[in-house]
Amino acid sequence: MEALVDWAFVWDILPLLARAALVTIEATLLGFGLAASLGLLLAIARMSHQPWIAWPVAGFIEFIRSTPLLVQLFFMFFVLPKFGIVMPAFLTGILGLGLHYSSYCAEVYRSGLENVPRGQWEAALALNLSLPRTYWDIVIPQAIPPVIPALGNYLVSLFKETPLLSAIAVLELMQTAKILGSEYFRYLEPITIVGLFFLGLSLLSAAAIRRVEHWLTTRRG
Amino acid sequence: MHRQLLAICSLASFAAGLSVASFAGFREFLPGLLAGAWVTLQITVAGCALAVVMGLIAGLCKLYGMLLLRWLAVAYIEVFRGTSALVQLFWLFFVLPHFGVHLSPMVVAIVALGLNVGAYGAEVVRGAILAVPRGQFEASIALNMSRLTMMWRIILPQAFVRMLPPWCNLFIELLKASALVSLITLSDLTFKAYQMNQTTFRTMEIFSLVLAIYLGISLLITLSMRMLEARASAGLARGRTG
C-alpha cells in the first residue's frame, strides 16, 4: 500500500512553495500598507462635518464591507481594463485587498479618533490650530496607539484572505499549490503545507499582537 | 429609529435593484443570477445553522468541558481561525477524497463555511457567557439548580441577547465567504457571474448587479437580526431608555 504522505514529494515542492510564500507575504504587506493609509483618510473624511463628504464616504465603507472581496477582485480585474486601465494581476490584487481592508481599518481608526477626549479638540481650537494641524499633531498621535491591536487583527485577516488572489491568476501560495496538485495529481501534500503555513504564521502574529497589546497597556499605566 | 432607517435603506436598495434590473441590458442576466443567488442563499442559511451549532458546542466545551473536550475545542478554534477559509475549502474538496471520503461540493461548501465561522462564533459564545454577571451564577447555585438548568434557563437566555450583534457580523462574513464556493465548481451567484462574463463580456452590468444582490442579502440579514434583537431584549432593562 502506498504511504499516506509522500515525503520525497514534500521535499520536491517545498522550495517552489517557499518562493510563492514570499509573494503571499509581499501582497500582505503592500495591501496592508495601502489599507492602513487609505483607511485613515476614509475615517477622517467620514467624521467630517460636511454631509456631502461624510455621507458618500460612509456609504462607500458600508458597500465595501458588505460585498465579497472575491467579487470586488473580479470586478476590478475585468472592469478596469475596459476603461483602458491595464495592470498586472498582482497589482490588481493588492489594490483589491487594500481597498477592501481600508474600509475595515477606517472603522478601527474611527473608534480611536472618537475616543480622543473632547478637551483636546477644544484646546486645539483655542490655540487657533488649523484642522490639518489639529489632526496631525494632536488627535492622530493620541488616537492610533490604542487601536494598534485591532489593526493587527485586520493585518492577520488580510493575510488569510490573500489566497483569493489565486482566483485572478496571481501566482501566490494557493495558486502554486493548486498547480502542483493538478500537475502531480497529489493534492494532499501541497494544500496541507499551505494550511500549516497559514496556521503557523497566524498563531505567531496573534502572539505578537498580544505582546504589543500588553506593552501598550503597561506603558500607559 | 435606526431600525426604520435600515428598513427604508434595504427597501430602497431593492427598489433600485429592480428598476436597474428592468433595463434591457440587465434583464437578460437577471434570471441566471437569481438562480445563482438562490444557491448562495441556501449555502448561507445552512452554513449559518451549522456555525451556530458548532459555536455553541465549542464555546461551551472551551468554558466548561473536561480536559480532553476543552483541548479539542481549543484545537478546533485555533485551526479554523488560523487558516484561510479558501484553504479549508480546498482541503475538504481536494484532500478528503484522498482519505476515501467523497462529499458533494454543496456539502463541502456548507461544512467548510459552517466550521470556519463556527470557530469565530465559539469565541463570541464564550465572551457572551463570561459577560453574564456573576450574581446570576451564584443565585442559580443558591436555588439548587443543576448545571444544565442553570445554563438553559438562566445564563444562556441572558447571553443570547449579547451574542446577537456579533453573530450578525459573522453571518454577513459567511455570506461574503460563500463567494469562495464558486472556486469549487458550485454554481453560486459569483460563479454564474463569472460564467456569464466569459461568454458575453458585459462585465460592468453583470458584476454591478452581483454586488447589488450581495448588498441586498446582507442588508436583509442585518434587518432580520435587528428585529430578533428587539424581540429578545424585550423585558430586559438594558441600554438607553426612550
Image: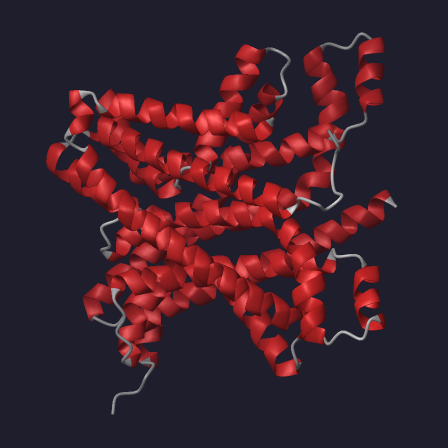
Q: Is residue A197 visible?
A: yes
Name the residue nearer the viewer: B166 or A178.
Answer: B166
Q: Quadrant of the C terminus of chain B?
A: top right
- Establish if A23 lies above or below B152: above
Answer above or below: position of B91 versus B85: below
Q: Is residue A16 visible?
A: no
- Is residue A92 depicted above or below B180 in this figure? above
**Residue sitting at 68 percent across and 14 percent down?**
A132
Residue farthest to the right, as pictured: A221
Residue A15 locus on image (x, y percent):
36, 65
Please tell me which residue is depicted at 75% across the width and 34% down the height of the picture. B240
| Residue B88 percent across, percent down from the top left | 39, 63
Residue extending farthest to the top is A128
**Left or right position of B132 against B142:** left
Residue B13: percent from the left, percent from the top?
Answer: 39, 26
Q: Nearer the viewer, residue A60 or B238?
A: B238
A158 or A104, nearer to the observer? A104
Q: Which colour style is shown?
A: secondary structure
Q: Give the number of callouts.
A: 0
Q: Who is closer to the viewer here, A151 or B124?
A: B124
Residue A192 at what x, y percent from top left? 38, 69
Say which residue appears at 30% left-offset and 39% top-offset. Answer: A89
Q: Residue furthest bottom?
A: A1
Query: Which quarter of the picture shows residue A7?
Result: bottom left
Q: Quadrant of the N terminus of chain B?
A: top right
Residue A10 as seen in the image, left or right of residue A134: left
